[in-house]
Image: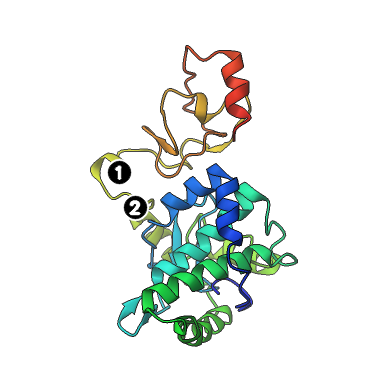
Amino acid sequence: MSSGDIDDTLAPEGVLEDLRLRNQAFNQYLIEAFACVPIRTFFIPYGAGISADGDRVYISYDVQTTMNGVDCGSALVRHETVEWGLRKFCGIGIDYLSDPSGHRIANRCEADHVNALLGSEEGWELYTEILDLQILIDERTEFEDRPIPQDLAMYPYTDAMREKLVSAMSNARSMEEWNKNPGGRIDTEEYDDKMDKREVNYREGTTDTRCGLCTMFMPPHGCSAVKGVIFPQDLCDLFERVEDVSQDEVRSDAGTE
């Protein structure tokens, strides 16, 4: 459901489960990502979205997700994180506009969760009836003066929409809200003391230089110095190599990612 053109088509049952069984990194990401508490203080043109690094999920502040007294916002979290994870780990849905498969697998996960939350196989029908109208309104709403998160993933949007989003990110409301936003999944003093990925130039690493070989890496997807989900194959400017890692271990470990 969520992002884009209101394609509510569901992928066949079992597709996501099979992909999770065959891709350990993808499965681990979803285990952690499904616990993400969505941020609801920004405007998201397609109703919901995710940060470019897959670490934060945004639900537009004007989207109401309560159905029959049950908050179904966690279903949007599942949709966004599945869609992002399929692109990152499985190469599915990379060309968002021409390949709907990732979106439809995410729809299936979202629908199964909605039905479980509402305790009915008809839950998805009620959910889409309420959500789709809100998404359509948000798709057509001007947002030049609304708060847009700085790290919003751009893959669901057209080139023209991306230009407008980037421009809106620098407006006063966007900057004010971004500066208030703690981000991430863990709201603790220890977490707040860590650095943002933007500050440390978090990026894709190499076989020889990457987070999985760093003294600060905390398996499976953590770091003692940087906030958020950290992937072993990525890298930042704080990198400190673990001294006792052999070249054979470097090559072997890299091959498992």
Q: Looking at the picture, does residue 150 appear above or below residue 225?
A: below
> Which residue is drawn at the image coordinates 35% and 38% (left, top)?
194
Mark 2 Cα-neighbour bin, 10 Å: few <14, some 14–19, many ≥20? few
Where residue 226 sits: x, y (%)?
A: 40, 37
In the rendering, at what x and y percent does residue 22 appear?
60, 46
The quadrant of the picture occupied by the C terminus is top right
- Give amino acid for label 2: Pro
Q: Which residue is mark 1?
A: 192
Query: Image quarter for residue 107?
Result: bottom right
Would you say 159 lies left or right of 79 here? right
- Pick whichever, 43 or 59, lies toward us: 59
Q: Residue most toward the left?
A: 189
Residue, disc 2: 182
Among numbered discs 2 and 1, the one appearing first in the sequence: 2
State which quadrant residue 196 falls in: top left
Tell me the distance, in whole angstroms, between the alpha carbons under discs 2 and 1: 7 Å
Residue 232, above or below 157: above
State yes or no: discs 2 and 1 in contact (Cβ < 8 Å). yes
Image quarter of the N terminus:
bottom right
| Residue at figure coordinates x 63%, y 53% from the top left | 87
Amino acid type assigned to the residue bearing label 1 in the image: Asp
Judging depth in this view, the residue of 174 and 152 nearest the camera is: 152
Q: List x then y, in percent, for residue 4.
A: 61, 73
Residue 42 seen: no
Instruction: Please indicate, yes or no, whether residue 97 appears anywhere in the rendered image.
Output: yes
Mark 1: few/some/many CA within 10 Å (<14, 14-19, 20+):
some
Q: How is the image coloured?
A: rainbow
- Disc 1 is placed on an element classified as helix
Furthest residue to the right?
98
